[in-house]
Image (cartoon, rainbow, N blue to C red):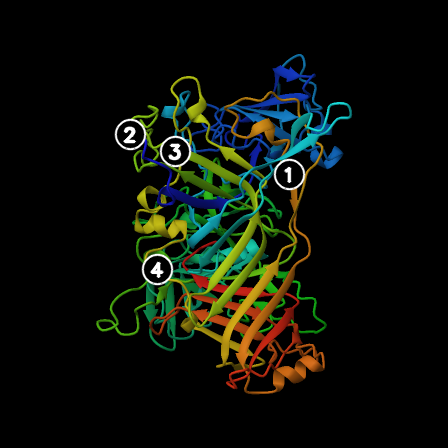
């Protein structure tokens, strides 16, 4: 139909974490290996090929030895090796020579790397007998092991885990590819351009403004996140009668009316005690009974916590623990034990892709406040009213693959975790059962005080430190609404037919936030503008193939198939009834311990200092019209580095007190370093809480605890009305505490 054109209402935008991928020798099965393929070694192009042996169903490499990534999606990603021994050359180990390889071609089963491996594979294939291959996180989206390859584009359903809701976005500018064309005038060839050749490929200028319905974009703007283990203290003291692994009952010295059968009980160090099956509550003396028995000694000095079935602990009383040390940047670890979820309809459901793994930590990390004080407030022990200088390193991640006692997650861990750490699992449910976050919408008239209450809330602390996560943004445009992206191959491949959607799908990889702006005034919602750059752009070129052309990539259609159920909406970050934005009337602002009632508007600006760098990593590769990433990504940025952070806050107030002016004119450092208290009367706290009942509600808290007021003008208005001042405030850093239904931002 000649009148059918691309329209904005048929555009889909989703995003997802970039996580990288680790493939360890014997990691998918006892016989899994990485192979250096001899027949395709190219000494002229300086490339080597990698293949994979003996994958497994549901693993990143399946039983057909196919890597579960769309064709060409990994072109431009970087690879390092670790732990390699003979027959591989130790020189391929990153730790020895620092060699980094770039993927310049990707088929279903093979990766072509440049430069060539140091391992001599000229006379035969060489298989690993140890070690691992690591595809680095930057430019490498989280894997979706449910995708399917096919020889023909029109039968394929390739995709990545880019199923997340961007937000309440009305306008967006994409980091469209720009060719930096080089033009040369040559002496003797007249006034016109004599030679033109393409230079760098640039993917900058991405931007969107969203009305905030949760605080997830602070994670990408600041960089670090820790979670509060969703536990509640029982509030009683064990009587010290239990012995390690020998009894199924624990005596306590007070009433335990708060707990119920099915609750999971933990010690204060995160050690799993057991799941409650019986409670004898006699007020001053009570007994807790467990189906699994206690695997640890409980003493009268231990504090007990419980979770209303929110966490899966060890199954059958066996340990469920990490089997290796986790380092910052890892998105993969081994575990011991049997991961039975206990989160579904029964107590024997296996943990599956889409569940979330929790690594609770009772060791702390420095929040890097760089303040000259002995104060050592630890989150979550201290909350939004406190000076937070340290935080417990508890992390929650989505499971993207689980196989052979190995777990791959959707986002790299940001902290180190010791070997033999207890791990737990959680899962989204359609309601609040089994500890799933859930927003209550029961009418306040029928159930007073529950409307708008968040059951099983997830509290997270977000702050800046050393790293900044990257993300992948998927964008598809189409002419009509045929061919739903439901994972089923469609027939929209007949070019020009009535069923042809003419879909164009792109994935912008290696996206990082450059700067952001948060605004609120008395006329609108809390708005966040995010500016970002991408490293390169994958394009579905299935329609350019010579035969059986069609959409090779299975684009996400958010509310048609990706988030079309209660559970899927929670997984995508747009749980039903949570989509309403934070409005100006949801906000309060406290400055120097006083709630300000005269704030007209505020703007918080932040810069991440991100810079992209092009490096000389060219590869002699042929150009093809079906290349998903042209020229093997060699004309695109190789690395992206976060630089210095800068923040500034502007508050427009109706002046009723000279305090701000006096602090500005004296250059007062608004932080009290004369006390070791964990509170500071000078702190600025921006609070936004959605309306609801008396329980916990969705919340965003922005904390600024060390700052200078640099400008406090007092202009006389022409209309002789109230004097307004635009305060300019320069914080050292900001921290954000969110309470929402997201296990991980």
Quadrant (top left/top right/bottom left/bottom right) for the N terminus: top left
Examine the rendered structure and indicate whether residue 149 appears above or below residue 730.
Answer: above
Query: For residue 499, which numbered disc appears in the image?
Result: 2
**Mark 3 falls on what kind of element?**
loop
Sequence order check, earlier mark of 2 and 4: 4
Q: Residue at 30% of width from left, 57% of height from top?
A: 431
Query: For residue 255, which numbered disc appears in the image?
Result: none
**Mark 2 falls on what kind of element?**
loop
Indicate the position of residue 581 as horizontal and vertical percent values: 40, 63
Examine the rendered structure and indicate whether residue 125 appears above or below residue 16.
Answer: above
Q: Is there a contact, CB below 8 Å, between mark 2 and mark 3?
A: no
Foreground mark, 3 or 4? 3
**Mark 4 falls on what kind of element?**
strand
Outermost residue, front direction?
190
Distance from disc 2 to disc 3, alpha carbons, whole Å, reads: 11 Å
Examine the rendered structure and indicate whether residue 232 appears above or below residue 189.
Answer: below
Dot 3 alpha-carbon crowd within 10 angstroms: few under 14, some 14 to 19, many 20 or more: many
Q: Is there a contact, CB below 8 Å, between mark 4 and mark 1?
A: no
Query: For residue 503, which numbered disc appears in the image?
Result: 3
Sequence order check, earlier mark of 1 and 2: 2
Distance from disc 4 to disc 1, alpha carbons, whole Å, reads: 42 Å
Sequence order check, earlier mark of 4 and 1: 4
Q: Nearer the viewer, residue 492 or 55?
A: 492
For residue 377, which quarter of the picture?
Answer: bottom right
Sequence order check, earlier mark of 3 and 4: 4
Q: Nearer the viewer, residue 369 or 336?
A: 369
Q: Is there a contact, CB below 8 Å, between mark 2 and mark 4?
A: no
Distance from disc 1 to disc 2, alpha carbons, whole Å, reads: 38 Å
Residue indicated by mark 1: 637
Indicate the position of residue 255 as horizontal and vertical percent values: 37, 74
For residue 718, which quarter of the picture?
Answer: bottom right
């Amino acid at each position: 139909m000649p009148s059918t054109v691309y329209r904005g209402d048929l555009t889909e935008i989703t995003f997802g974490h970039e996580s990288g991928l680790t493939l360890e020798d014997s990691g998918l099965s006892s016989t899994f290996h990485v192979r250096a393929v001899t027949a395709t070694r190219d000494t002229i192009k300086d490339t080597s090929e990698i293949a994979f042996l003996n994958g497994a169903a549901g693993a990143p490499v399946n039983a057909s030895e196919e890597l579960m990534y769309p064709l060409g999606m990994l072109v431009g990603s970087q690879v390092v090796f670790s732990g390699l021994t003979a027959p591989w050359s130790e020189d391929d180990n990153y730790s020895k020579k620092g060699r980094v390889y770039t993927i310049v071609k990707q088929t279903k089963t093979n990766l072509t790397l440049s430069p060539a491996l140091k391992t001599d594979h000229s006379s035969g294939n060489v298989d690993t007998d140890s070690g691992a291959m690591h595809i680095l996180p930057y430019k490498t989206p989280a894997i979706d092991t449910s995708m399917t390859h096919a020889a023909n584009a029109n039968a394929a359903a390739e995709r990545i885990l880019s199923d997340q809701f961007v937000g309440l976005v009305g306008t967006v500018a994409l980091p469209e590819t720009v060719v930096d064309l080089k033009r040369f005038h040559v002496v003797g060839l007249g006034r016109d351009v004599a030679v033109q050749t393409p230079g760098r490929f640039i993917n900058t200028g991405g931007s969107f403004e969203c009305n905030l319905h949760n605080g997830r974009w602070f994670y990408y703007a600041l960089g670090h996140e820790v979670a509060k283990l969703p536990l509640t203290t029982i509030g009683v003291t064990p009587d010290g009668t239990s012995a390690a692994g020998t009894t199924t009952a624990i005596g306590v010295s007070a009433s335990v009316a708060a707990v119920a059968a099915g609750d999971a009980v933990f010690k204060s160090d995160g050690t799993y005690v057991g799941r409650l099956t019986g409670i004898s509550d006699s007020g001053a003396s009570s007994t807790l009974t467990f189906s699994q028995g206690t695997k640890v000694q409980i003493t009268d000095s231990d504090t007990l916590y419980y979770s209303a079935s929110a966490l899966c602990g060890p199954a059958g009383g066996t340990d469920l623990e990490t089997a290796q040390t986790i380092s910052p940047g890892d998105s993969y670890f081994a575990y011991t034990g049997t991961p039975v979820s206990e989160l579904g309809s029964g107590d024997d459901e296996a943990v599956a892709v889409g569940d979330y793994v929790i690594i609770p930590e009772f060791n702390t990390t420095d929040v890097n406040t760089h303040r000259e004080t002995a104060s050592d407030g630890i989150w979550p022990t201290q909350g939004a009213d406190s000076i937070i200088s340290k935080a417990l390193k508890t992390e929650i991640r989505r499971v993207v693959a689980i196989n052979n006692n190995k777990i791959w997650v959707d986002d790299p861990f940001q902290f180190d975790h010791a070997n033999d750490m207890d791990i737990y699992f959680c899962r989204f449910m359609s309601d609040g059962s089994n500890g799933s976050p859930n927003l209550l919408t029961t009418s306040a008239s029928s159930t007073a005080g529950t409307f708008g209450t968040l059951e099983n809330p997830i509290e997270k602390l977000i702050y800046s430190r050393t790293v900044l996560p990257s993300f992948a943004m998927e964008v598809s445009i189409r002419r009509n609404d045929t061919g739903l992206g439901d994972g089923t191959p469609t027939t929209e491949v007949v070019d020009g037919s009535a069923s042809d959607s003419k879909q164009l799908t792109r994935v912008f990889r290696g996206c990082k936030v450059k700067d952001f702006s948060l605004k609120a005034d008395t006329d609108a919602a809390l708005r966040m503008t995010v500016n970002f750059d991408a490293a390169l752009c994958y394009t579905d070129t299935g329609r350019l193939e010579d035969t059986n052309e069609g959409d090779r990539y299975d684009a996400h259609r958010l509310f048609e198939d990706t988030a079309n159920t209660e559970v899927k909406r929670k997984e995508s970050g747009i749980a039903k009834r949570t989509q309403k934005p934070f409005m100006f009337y949801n906000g309060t602002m406290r400055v120097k311990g006083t709630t300000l009632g005269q704030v007209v508007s505020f703007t918080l600006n932040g810069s991440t200092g991100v810079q992209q760098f092009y490096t000389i990593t060219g590869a002699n590769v042929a150009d093809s019209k079906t290349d998903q990433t042209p020229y093997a990504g060699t004309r695109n940025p190789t690395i992206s580095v976060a630089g210095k952070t800068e923040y500034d806050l502007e508050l427009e107030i109706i002046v009723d007190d000279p305090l701000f002016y006096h602090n500005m004119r004296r250059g007062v450092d608004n932080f009290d370093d004369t006390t070791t208290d964990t509170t500071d009367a000078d702190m600025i706290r921006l609070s936004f809480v959605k309306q609801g009942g008396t329980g916990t509600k969705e919340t965003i808290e922005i904390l600024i605890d060390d700052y200078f007021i640099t400008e406090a003008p007092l202009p006389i208005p022409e209309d002789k009305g109230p004097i307004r001042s635009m305060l300019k405030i320069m914080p050292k850093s900001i921290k954000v505490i969110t309470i929402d239904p997201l296990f991980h931002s």
